Image (cartoon, coloured by chain):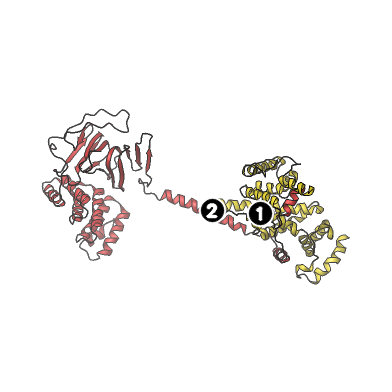
Chain colours: A red, B yellow
């Protein structure tokens, strides 16, 4: 006790007479205890309320069906599992190079640059899912399939095996061979290599279904990845369109806008693609993507007014009122005396 | 009767100059240098302002010192002193033993400091305030012997990491040298709880500073400081 008292003696404040005076003055002048601490509670309550509101807004403001969260896990064997909340799952081999290039309500583009991947895509109306490889695009609508990119970097081979559903494989850049356009359905395997390599087992399944490799069809025999120029793609699309092969024409135009975004034909190709999808195929979501792409590729194109008018009509048909109103306002502001003023003015339920 | 005569003694001056500077009051902090605490309390209860000032004067050093050691910093001192005395004036009618004003106001200081530390902790957790640091150089007296300084620095470094209630109990035990029962009474806790908290603090201290650590349960403990005191005494 004694030594403890001595400890206290060595810890004493500087208590001058002036300070004592000041303390007494404050005490005498105040009739009640200081309540400044209440502000701390007010601030604390405000902070809690703000955090709660922020959390609520964060969750409530997410667009329906499209969450920004992408889950990526890797198991002990090195296989990477990618899960998008839009209903797309991928299992990528240990050596695989994979990336998500685009995510929107209407289009998801995944890129497998090397290695192998199993994909499982849930079908949703109006949405396109494309797995792009160095030479081929694999467009899917509700399917489960396997993609393998093998061989050297300059001329990689691509293998596609469909476990469920259907995919569309098409060339996506110059390959030195003619353009490939091939549908692969359940149980089929397609490969760009000649002869075809053995089927790769599913990397995410311990007991993958035994699927015999299917050789390319007679139409594809001898056809490898084509080295088609932008000009050739555009002309090919024109020919196909004149022959009534609208889907094939659309595929050519789509490849052009993707593979040659810097080409002068790309904005027009995107516009034409949108028109075909909108008027000929009835793929409104794809058309919207194409029109928007056209605007991005060349904002000052001579046909921009037509693109914007098309977008208004398209959103009107799709029932997207807010998008329709927004594009309508944009058109009328930019082209108050435009050639589509009347039709645009009547759009969006007016 | 005592009150009446006391009023004449000090009250005359107060009536003549109610707002006179405090220095006009007798300069004393010792309870035995003037009227008994019970007399001052009775006068204060009779709304005699001079009685409150006399009580303030008498215990201002005690209150400042206790608050300083519990808080571990000078910055909070004036607010804590004001809050403690204000609370004392408010609760004065409930003081059953006016002669025990000293321990009563000490308990008020401790509880007021405890509330302040808890609020600070909450504000710190919520990110509204940076944790208060203890400036050991400003805390310790210039005349502190080296061995005492070592112990005090270790104690206050430990204190800064403790929860408010444990921190206060530890300071009251280690620095103020109060008995466990007194600490329990001040903090309005059970004796077992106080013991547990002090053991917890001592354990932390012994972990960080094995040479400084003490046996908290022992009432007749011999701290390094005590040993050095004894050595100095023998010398």
Which residue bears the numbered disc 2? Answer: B127
Q: Position of residue B160 (x, y in %)?
A: 62, 50
**Mark nearer the N terminus (2 vs 1):** 1
- Asked if one can make out residue A153 in the rendered structure from this viewpoint, the answer is yes
* Callout 1: chain: B
A324 versus B8 height, above or below:
above
x 81%, y 70%: residue: B15
* Callout 2: chain: B
Instruction: Compare residues B46 and A164 and report the one nearer the observer.
Output: A164
Q: Position of residue A270 (x, y in %)?
A: 21, 53
**Badge 1, how many Cα within 10 Å: few under 14, some, many 20+?**
many
Instruction: Compare residues B99 and B228 and report the one nearer the observer.
Output: B228
B19 versus A296 height, above or below:
below
**Badge 2, how many Cα within 10 Å: few under 14, some, many 20+?**
few
Which residue bears the numbered disc 1? Answer: B71
Helix, strand or loop for disc 1: helix
Q: Position of residue A212 (x, y in %)?
A: 21, 29
Q: Are marks 2 and 1 in contact (CB under 8 Å)?
A: no
């Amino acid at each position: 006790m004694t030594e403890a008292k001595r400890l206290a003696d060595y810890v004493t404040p500087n208590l001058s007479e002036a300070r004592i005076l000041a303390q007494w003055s404050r005490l005498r002048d105040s009739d009640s205890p200081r309540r400044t601490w209440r502000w701390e509670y007010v601030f604390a309550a405000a902070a809690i309320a703000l955090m709660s509101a922020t959390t609520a807004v964060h969750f409530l403001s997410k667009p329906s069906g499209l969450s920004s969260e992408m889950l990526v896990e890797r198991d002990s064997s090195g296989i990477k599992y990618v899960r998008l909340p839009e209903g797309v799952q991928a299992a990528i081999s240990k050596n695989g190079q994979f990336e998500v290039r685009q995510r929107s309500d209407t289009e998801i583009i995944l890129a497998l640059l090397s290695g192998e991947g199993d994909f499982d895509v849930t079908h949703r109306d109006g949405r396109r899912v494309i797995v792009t490889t160095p030479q081929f695009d694999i467009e899917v609508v509700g399917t489960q399939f396997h993609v393998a990119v093998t061989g050297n970097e300059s001329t990689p081979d691509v293998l596609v095996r469909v476990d469920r559903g259907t995919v569309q494989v098409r060339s996506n850049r110059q390959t030195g061979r003619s353009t490939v356009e091939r549908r692969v359905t359940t149980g089929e395997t397609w490969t760009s290599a000649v002869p075809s390599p053995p089927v790769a087992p599913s990397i995410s399944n311990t007991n993958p279904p035994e699927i015999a490799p299917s050789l390319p069809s007679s139409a594809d025999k001898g056809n490898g990845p084509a080295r088609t120029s932008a000009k050739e793609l555009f002309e090919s699309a024109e020919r196909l369109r004149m022959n009534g092969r609208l889907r094939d024409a659309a595929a050519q135009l789509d490849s052009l806008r993707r593979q040659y975004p810097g080409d002068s034909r790309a904005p027009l190709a995107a516009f034409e693609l949108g028109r075909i999808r909108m008027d000929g195929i009835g793929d409104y979501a794809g058309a919207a993507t194409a029109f928007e792409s056209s605007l991005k590729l060349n904002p000052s194109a001579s046909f921009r007014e037509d693109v914007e008018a098309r977008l208004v009509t398209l959103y009107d048909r799709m029932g997207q009122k807010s998008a329709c109103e927004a594009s309508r306002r944009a058109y009328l502001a930019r082209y108050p005396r435009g050639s589509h003023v009347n039709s645009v003015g009547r759009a969006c339920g007016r | 009767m005592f009150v009446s005569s006391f009023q004449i003694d000090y009250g005359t001056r107060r009536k003549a100059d109610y707002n006179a500077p405090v220095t006009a009051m007798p300069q004393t902090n010792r309870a035995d240098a003037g009227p008994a605490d019970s007399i001052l309390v009775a006068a204060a209860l009779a709304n005699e302002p001079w009685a409150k000032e006399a009580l303030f004067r008498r215990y201002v050093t005690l209150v400042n010192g206790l608050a300083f050691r519990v808080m571990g910093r000078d910055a909070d001192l004036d607010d804590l002193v004001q809050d403690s005395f204000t609370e004392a004036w408010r609760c004065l009618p409930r003081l059953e033993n006016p002669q025990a004003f000293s321990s009563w106001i000490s308990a008020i200081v401790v509880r007021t400091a405890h509330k302040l530390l808890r609020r600070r902790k909450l504000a710190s957790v919520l990110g509204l305030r940076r944790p208060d640091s203890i400036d050991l150089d400003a805390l310790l007296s210039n005349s502190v012997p080296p061995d005492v300084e070592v112990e005090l620095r270790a104690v206050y470094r430990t204190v800064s990491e403790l929860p408010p209630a444990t921190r206060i109990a530890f300071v009251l035990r280690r620095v103020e040298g109060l008995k466990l029962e007194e600490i329990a009474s001040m903090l309005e806790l059970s004796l077992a709880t106080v013991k547990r908290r002090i053991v917890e603090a001592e354990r932390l201290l012994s972990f960080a500073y094995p040479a400084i650590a003490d046996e908290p349960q022992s009432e007749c403990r011999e701290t390094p400081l005590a040993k050095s005191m004894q050595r100095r005494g023998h010398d």
